[in-house]
Amino acid sequence: MYWSEKEQSHLLEAIPSYREKIKNKDITVAKRITLELAEEIHQSVPDVQGRTVNAINERLPYLENLLAGIFEAHHYAAKDRELYSTFRRENGSVDPNLCNTRHKYNGAMTEWRKKNE
């Protein structure tokens, strides 16, 4: 099910705070923070209550990577590409946010892991 602009807008608004919360955290802590934020958004934003906490938990890192310009634009869903690289990270990092590795980014995540792990 596609995310509507209204649903997604709430997640996009959370990205600056999300980035600040996970900055310099190890992956275990960052995943916990992502889940906690997903739960908070789910409980406090009526527009996304039709989604599961897990859906929000998976979408946050996807959007964070998309906005930061991680991977290449063609690795993202066509409907999301207009957001590609529109809100780069403050430190300029291009390392993927690994809080959701279920999304394969059309193979880019697999390629990155082979090179970096």
Image (tube, helix red, strand yellow):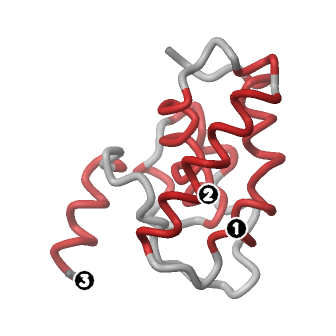
* Up-down relation of residue 43 to residue 87 (above or below): above
Q: Residues within 10 Å of mark 1 (few under 14, many from 20)?
A: some
**Which of the 4 image quarters holds residue 65?**
bottom right
* Up-down relation of residue 112 to residue 80 (above or below): below
Secondary structure under badge 2? helix
Residue 19 numbered tag: 1
Q: Residues within 10 Å of mark 2 (few under 14, many from 20)?
A: many
Q: Position of residue 46 (x, y in %)?
A: 81, 17
**Taking 4 as reference, is 71 left or right?**
left
Q: Position of residue 91 (x, y in %)?
A: 70, 87
As drawn, the residue found furthest toward the left would be 114
Q: Which residue is mark 3?
A: 116
The kind of residue tagged 1 is Arg
Query: Are dots 2 and 1 in contact, CB under 8 Å?
Result: yes
The kind of residue tagged 2 is Glu
The kind of residue tagged 3 is Asn
The answer to which of 110 and 48 lies nearer the viewer is 48
